[in-house]
Amino acid sequence: MSVKQRNNVNAKGSGPGCMVFAHGYGCDQNMWRLLEPAFEGRYRTILFDLVGSGGSDLAAYDRDKYGSLEGHASDVLEIVDEFADGPVVFVGHSVSATIGMLAANRAPERFAAQIMVGPSPCYINDGDYVGGFTRGDIAGLLETLERNYLGWAGTMAPAIMGAPDQPELSVELTNSFCRTDPEIAKHFARVTFESDHRADVGRSTTPALIVQCSDDLIAPRTVGDYMHATMPDSTLCIIDNVGHCPHLSAPCASVDAIAAFLQRRQL
Amino acid sequence: MAAPEPMPPAAETLFEHAPCGLVLCSADGTIRRVNARFCSWLGHAAEQLVGQRRVQDLFTMGGRLFHQTHSGPLLLLQGSVGEIRLDLVHRDGHTVPMLLNAVRRLHDGVAFIELAFMVLSDREKYESELLRARQRAEAALAAHREAEAALARSRQVLELALRGARMGIWSSDLASNTVWWSRELEELFGLPEGGFGGSQAHFRSLVHDDDRSALATAVDAAVAGHHDYIVEFRFARPDGEIRWMEGRGRAIYDDGGRPVMLHGLGIDITDRKQAESVLVRQAAIFEHQSDAIVAIDLAGVIVDFNPASERMLGYRIDEVLGRPISMFHLPDRAEDIDREARAALGSQGEWRSEVVFVRKDGSQGLCESVLKPLADAGGAIYGAVSVNRDITERRRIDDQLRALNEELSDAGRRKDEFLATLAHELRNPLAPMRSELEILRLADLADPKLRRSREMLERQVVHLTHLVDDLLEVSRITEGKLSLRKHRLDLGTALREAAQAVDAMMQAAAHELVLDLPDEPVSLVADPTRLAQVVQNLLNNAAKYTPPGGRVTLRGRRDNDEAVITIADSGIGIAAEHLPRLFEMFSQLDPALNRSQGGLGIGLALVRGLTALHGGSVSGRSEGVGRGSEFVIRLPLGAVDELSVTPVPMSSTDPDPDRADGGRSVLVVDDNLDALESLAELLTLQGHTVRTAADGESAVAVAAEFRPAVVLLDIGLPRVNGYEVSRRIRSEPWGRAMRLVAVTGWGQAQDRDAAMTAGFDHHLTKPVDLAALDALLALPLRDVAAG
């Protein structure tokens, strides 16, 4: 079982530098469809699926290993080792921003910068810390997950209703999108939303760009501010966007923010 | 004219009252239009929603999370989602389960989201139930699989256990009369897989003939009695080997109490049976052993005790178990015994000893003990076992015998010592007696009465001397102090000389002495003196015990590697009852006759002793009283290497013809004054010049001054003995040529040797043979230089 097979690694683009794109909770590498093309002309771009998501090898989902985000961080390091020539720019969305941060903490020499899109080190409120959710909220998510897997046909929607305005989408793409094993989905949901990596934030020395949405339920402003204040070398960039996926709902603004940061850092 | 088609409802009406909730939102979710259906379902007025709320705010938190992570991105990416299950929240707060389809579309370049909602109450219930049922079914299936796996595992464990314990299981259906055997059971019977025929008949055919009926009886009784059976039986394996099995089983009954099935176990107990028989045998040995067997643990505490131990020690087994073995030892020996035993076990692996034991009644005994360690199968020592044989009685008897033996040997030794001392003492008075008689002989006695008196005395003294000599010789033989000086001699010559020696006696008794000697020489190795003694002794007896005018025959011949000497006479013979004890000392052939002829009856004992020393034998024969006797001596001819000394001529040296008057200067030394005086006077009468000394020191002094040619030295002198005198004389220049003659009461070879070693030239025994003494004195004088 190679790393490529395990994580469904796709390497594109060319250039002196290397950018790694890591999707967030719930979907897969397809969510970079609107963002990645902007960079593949100048950088070598590496896209992959977290084990348990998308086209990754579900059989490799070891509950012990992936019972902590460190398990995914180890996979990231393996991908970087195998597919990158030098220090990479790691673009991580949502939980993958944390995963990337953990990997960069372990092997800082392999990371040139981290682009954190909608990151949150801890989702659950804790005293003064506002993560945004209670444990009951997480339970609600798990219930909804369960109901939606009873007769999940969400990805068949385009077959039923068509994909208006986007006829170029293929059926295969939509079929793989967000489809995963329900038990793995629930396990990953728990691991993601019950994780607490606030302690690792302060240890992160890799230069970071925090892409904060103006109105994000999952990564609220308070969390972005916390991260900016805690990370030694971070830049906070607020994008006018309602929702958790600026790379999908505000791709241009996202590209601009990232490109500006990279230029400033001469990466 | 046709009726006009009814007007369809206006689009607005259709929108408002569509059978589903319809919502139009901007890209960020802000509600732009909402239909009445949606509002009534959620209890909101349209005015409260339009431009006021975002559609996702109407979701539960779980729904919002799901939308943000799943359906939202989907919508963005593929433009539509279908059949999303979300809960929305009614204005009252209760959740409304809904199903939603949505599309994202550009209208005039601006993105809008169009959502259609359905309420799912009944379907929700149904789906929930279905979900729960599926979960239950999955759980049941998982449990079922788990149970199956557990069953498979336990079956494997059972098979292992059965195989390991050499057990097999079987069951029998009584209706169809079929029998099933497990694989293990087939293996126990040595059958291949599937080799069991499945019938009672097949099983019975494998059971030993003698055990079949007992097995059947036990099974029937158990079935009838509704209980288990256990029965041992023998069975045969295909290779003919007979093994033992313990069969156990029971029946299963239907509602009517009728047996429908049997099932049970077969256990191969061959090993157990063999072990049992070994145990039974060992137990029998342990119980019936006559030796006391006691087993102890490492601390020396008694763990087993056989009946023989009970008998030997007087304790019952229950009185000794758990008590230390030292309870049977003497208190002051217990520690040492423990130490010795442990040391011996450690170094030699066993301890053998004789141990004093104390019985219950306090009495003591002695036993021969062997202690060996006991080890388990792994080789670890866990105790020891001792086998003890009571030797108290045996030791007592042995001790008694030994004491008796010692007494007997002491007695024998004392008797022999007494006889030797007696003989030696008896000699002393004889010497002076003989000397005086010689003097009397030389003094020419005129009175015939005196002459006859002297002759009678002479004869008696001679006889007495012979008796004492014989007694002394026999004593020497029994004390082992007599040794032979063997030479090679000719049988014929020796016998002729012996005949000559008794010639006078034969003539005196008017007997005819017939010689029958071998024609060719017969060479034999023997002590010539002793041989002569033996032959003469028998000839004397022959002459004595034959009435005058009788006939004595002396025959000698060679018989293979033996010389055979026969002395026969025509005399009074020997009664049959005397023959067995003929050669024993002091045996009384005929007391009256014996005493009349004189003698102690030791002559034949002496003959036997001397022939035995030669390695030969003597036997006596007689036809009976008055019918003569015959004595036969057998002597081995002997080998060359038996000679101790090279042949020495029998004849004595010739006297020196140069002797002028023959007189010598003689110094006589003896602490017996009578003997000293009589010998000195005798020698003087014979023409020698005699000086005397009665002790060693004066002997040396006189010798120094007198310078005799010959010194006659008694050895047994007080303070300085004769050997010492000789040495002192020899150490002087004037003493070297002196002829020193030792005179002793002992005539043994070692005495002669000692004399020679001390410097003596000759050795005479008392009473001194005067002829020998004459011969010595006649020897030529020696030069001082030549000494």
Image (tube, rainbow, N blue to C red):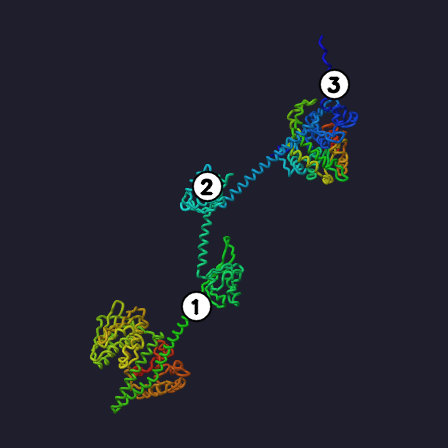
Q: Residues within 10 Å of mark 3 (few under 14, many from 20)?
A: few
Q: Tag on residue B11?
A: 3
Give B261 or B698, whichever is nearer the viewer: B261
Q: Where is residue B16 in the image (x, y as percent from the top left)?
A: 75, 21
Same-chain check, marks 3 and 1: yes
The alpha-carbon separation of the residues under discs 1 and 2 comes to 64 Å
Q: Mark 1 lies on which chain?
A: B
The answer to whether residue A141 is seen in the rendering is yes
- Residue under label 1, please give it: B395
- Residue under label 2, please give it: B186
Q: Quadrant of the C terminus of chain B?
A: bottom left
Q: Mark 3 lies on which chain?
A: B
Identity of the amino acid at label 1? Answer: Arg
Q: Does residue B593 appear to the left or right of A240 in the view shown?
A: left
Q: Nearer the N terminus, badge 1 or badge 2? A: 2
Q: Quadrant of the N terminus of chain B?
A: top right
Identity of the amino acid at label 3? Answer: Ala
